[in-house]
Image: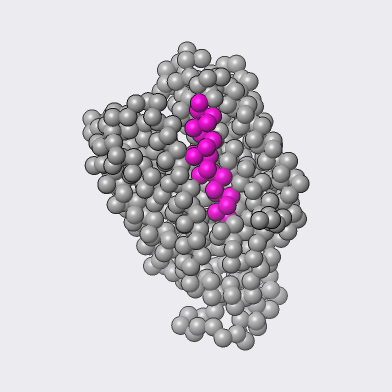
Amino acid sequence: MAIDRAQRALLALSLGAFGIATGEFVTLGLLPNVAGSFDVTIPQAGHLISAYALGVVVGGPLFTLLALRWSRKRFLLMLALALAAGNVASGAIGSFEGLLVVRFLAGLPHAAYFGAAAVAAGNLVEAGRRNTAMAVVLTGFTLANVVGVPLTTLIGQQAGWRMVFMLVGVIELIAALGILVLVPYQAENTDGAGRGVAAELRAFRNVQVWLALGIAAIGGGAMFSTFSYITPMMTRLAGYSESAMTPLLVLLGIGMTVGNTVGARMSNSGLMRTIYVSLGAQVVMAVVFFFTVHDKIAAAVTIVLFPFTTSLMLPPLQSRIIALAGGAPNLASASIHSAFNVANSLGAWLGGLTIAAGLGYGSPNLVSAGLALLGLMFALVSMGLGPRVAPRRLDFFTDEEKMQLRELTASASLPRLIPPLPVWPAGVNETPVEFDLRVFREM
């Protein structure tokens, strides 16, 4: 089957995501190797993970705001090259203190890349396929847990951890080449060109944007509370050997990949409904995992099902925050990935507290259940507010645009239970009527 140009561009964007996730998560498996080479303890080496996560949180908004006047293709190319440089430098640095600084710098382009790639992916296809296109970019992230992380962990154990970061740098260079050659100019900043920093910041006047970020930071913490301690759970409680962790991590990655794909398809018919289902299922599966982690077979089944439920909400959350941001989606789209790295730190920290309190290595699953439940509460609050905050997206349009859109929507046959919302962003491949109908359905 022939692959059209849009699909090739999506694959290039997905490869960049694959490299990012591989470089981020392989550090977990290679911490003992890094610690040994610098003669530091494993907890001290763990600061490398925190430094990278801090870089992601800081870099998402910072890079996005600095590059608002750039074309999106140029921005993505710059980010991919920066990611390549950060990983190559990580493999070459000679001191632990220097590596801490470099890992912080390597994390800076992370969120900005995912944000820009998601918006670009949505602009590559027609409106009805946007959620699926964004999910293709995220598939690179989830596939890294199936192939990239297990493979590079093995390489790192045999050839040294420095070789792994060098390899990730090469992957990002290939992704940069793919972006240069394959990503067309249709993915440029046509939806927010010239609107500047003020328009991007105005998106954060919408309380629904903050609620979406809250769902990611709190509800997403459920995923990381369990995943951060998956190795001691499976080896000390389920009874697996350390050598069995590679195939077990592959199972975890398969669950994430399938969940991401299913979540994209579900979100096409309802973003918020998919988020409710994901968070509710996470509560159930986290509690189930607390009990099944003591049995080899049951734990192996749950290690597939739990990440399936967690990754269901990734595509709809990304799509929702872009829709809520209206004509200025760049900063909001990047911020959702910064929020997920807050979730990473929060989930791992809270899970570690329960273990330190003597509640056992299975206790982070109960933390996961609590965080998912709190995330679900955020989602229900968002549903309660509904479309009452949506008209704030009118801030992104000029008076002339508003007049034209009102004339178009006033002449259309729309549901009259609530007034039609003239919120048709420039560059979106939908009529105002189609956009209003979708807003009503998603809210």
- Height in image: 406 above or below 248? below
66 and 304: which one is in front? Answer: 304
Query: Was residue 214 drawn as part of the magenta stretch in this picture?
Result: no
In which quadrant of the rendered image does the N terminus lie? bottom right
Question: What residue is drawn where x is 54% and y is 48%?
Answer: 139
Q: Residue at x 46, y 83 (%)?
A: 417
Q: Position of residue 411 (x, y in %)?
A: 62, 86
Count of labels shown? 0
Q: How far across and how far down the image is residue 128, in percent?
A: 59, 67
Indicate the colouring scheme: one colour
Return the x and y of residue 263 as percentages of the image width and height: 47, 57
Position above or below: 253 against 131: above
Kindly identify the residue that appears in the image at 68 percent across and 70 percent down.
398
Whether residue 265 is visible = yes
Point out the residue furthest to the front here: 1
Residue that appears at 52% across and 70% down? 439
Q: Is 50 above or below relative to 194?
A: above
Choose between 98 and 239: the one closer to the eye.
239
Residue 198 in view? no
* Res 406 quadrant in image: bottom right
Q: Position of residue 87 (x, y in %)?
A: 62, 29
Left or right position of 64 against 365: right
Q: Mostly what secondary structure, the magenta segment?
A: helix
Q: Which residues are magenta?
A: 134-154
Q: Is residue 218 left or right of residue 103?
A: left
